[in-house]
Amino acid sequence: MFEYFANLFSTDFMPHGHCFLWRPEILWVHVVSDAFIAIAYAAIPFALFRLVRLRRDLAFDWMFLLFGLFILACGTTHVMSIVTLWIPVYRLEGVVKAVTALASVPTAFLLIGLVPRVVKIPSAEQLRQANRELEAERQQVRKLNQELENRVSERTAALAQANTRLADLTRALNLAQAMIRKADGTILFWSQGSQELYGWNSDEALGKDSNQLLETQSVTPLEQIQVELLNSGQWQGELTHRKRDGSRVVVASHWSLQRGGDGAPVAITEVNNDITVQKQVELELLRTNEDLRHFAYAASHDLREPLRMVVIYTQLLAKDYQDKLDENAAEFINFAVEGALRMETLLTGLQQYWQTADQRRANRTKVDCNLALQQAKLNLGTAIDENGATVTSDRLPVIFGEEVALIQLFQNLIANAIKYRAAESPVIHVSGEIAGGIATFSVRDNGIGIQPEYRGEIFGVFKRLHGSRYPGAGIGLSICRRLVELHGGRIWVEQAAGQGSKFMFTLNDAAGQQ
């Protein structure tokens, strides 16, 4: 081995060019090829060393340096191939190749072991995709932040409005005749309005039992009111309270139950509106109407007898003295009889109108409107036959009402349709249905109809649009309106499809059966 290195630069062998017989076409191909390979091998390590220097954050930089040394050694072997063409230093060439081998083997094994770790490093496309996803997430975050800011702004504005409404409500509640009390009646809040109504200030009222302080009286027992309040959370009705000066006041009272998170009652808000004057006016109006009703009923009853006397004796006068009276006198007597008869008709209608007001809910039962309509048709049988009228109906509901009143209602509307018939025979159709506890009926005819400007007037007492052209006192539709109102409903008229009129009316207290 010592001898080998001692003769490292010896040229005791023949140059490699002799193998090519020094033929230039072969010799220079090897020279040029090995020269370019050596130059390239020398440039690659320089590029790798520069990359490691500029990129201090580069992963596995030691591998780049080791690979650069390996490439440089490979390039040196090609340089030695050119040298040995003329200078046979084969021992030195062998050392260079041995160094290259020593550099290549560790490099190869280290590179093989490094491959799995390198594979885990994201590629440029993966990094770009990750960046795109990250940017999308950032955009989403910005969007969510903007939405959150908008919601915060909206909630802030809503909270400000709620605070404003709460302040307004507090001021309004303080001005109202209101109190807040516990379920046992202990007063927790006493408004300025309550102080002005009842006379006790807040310090005097707080902590007191409201029913004892005000000596509450009600048509409905207070125990029953409490039960209804617990069941529905609301109660409203009329109460009588005592004021501080001892006088009594009637109030329209509204109670609202407040519950805690566990559902247990915690407080009752009570708002009272003084209606004492209104109740006094209503009572006086009821007395006046009652007096008027008795007077009208008595007057209509008492005046009919003198009118009958006038008619009878005027007719006797015309009969006994018909030969002695001229044509004008007979005509005058006839006018007097017709006027007296019309007056009797009006008084009869007035009496019927006030009799209608005497019908009460005490007589109400479940009424099959189909049977009520059938009875009305039987009562009008002669008029229906004489006028060739056709009366049809759909299946009508069963309601809770006064049977006689409903028969009269159908009878008056059908009679009205027959009376105000057109040239053709009357055709009348009755229909009805129930929705939401309200029964709605219609009576449609093909008569002469009613002009829109008169549809609001025809339900008044003694309202007649056609003068003496049609018989009657103008009381029938007024009675219909009264009967409907006694059942908690309303009545109106519309233009029927094509020709005629359609009377519509509603009745409350529907029994809900078809």
Image (tube, grey):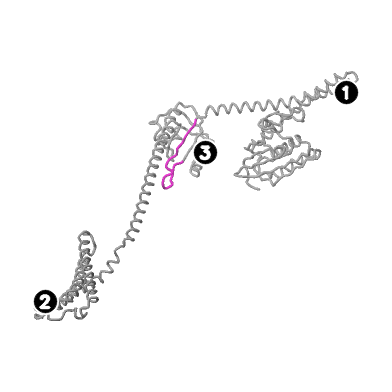
Asked whether, in this view, residue 96 is left or right of residue 471, the answer is left
Say which element carries label 2: loop
Asked whether, in this view, residue 302 is left or right of residue 283, the answer is right
Labelled disc at residue 46: none
Residue 216 within the magenta-colored segment of the rendering = no
Q: What is the x, y in percent for residue 367?
A: 68, 44
Say which element carries label 1: helix
Q: Which residue position is annotated with label 1?
A: 319
Task: Give the mark nearest the N terminus, 3 or 1.
Answer: 3
Of residues 320 and 47, the one drawn nearer to the viewer in this rendering: 47
Of residues 224 and 10, the one drawn nearer to the viewer in this rendering: 10
Boundaries of the magenta span: 257-273
Q: Which residue position is annotated with label 3?
A: 221
When the figure is inspected, residue 387 is found, relative to residue 29, above or below; the finding is above
Task: Give the mark nearest the N terminus, 2 or 3.
Answer: 2
In the picture, residue 118 is in which quadrant?
bottom left
Q: What is the x, y in percent for residue 416?
A: 73, 35
When the figure is inspected, residue 99 is found, relative to residue 282, above or below; the finding is below
Residue 263 within the magenta-colored segment of the rendering = yes
Say which element carries label 3: loop
User: Nearer the viewer's eye, disc 2 or disc 3?
Assistant: 2
Of residues 460 and 141, the one drawn nearer to the viewer in this rendering: 141
Q: Which residue position is annotated with label 2?
A: 9
Residue 168 makes an appearance in the image: yes
Q: CA distance from mark 3 to mark 1?
A: 71 Å
Q: What is the x, y in percent for residue 455?
A: 67, 32
| Image point (67%, 43%), residue name | 432
Asked whether, in this view, residue 199 is left or right of residue 337, the answer is left
Label 3 amino acid? Pro
* Label 2 crowd (10 A; few <14 / some 14-19 / many >=20): some
Q: Main secondary structure of the magenta part?
A: strand
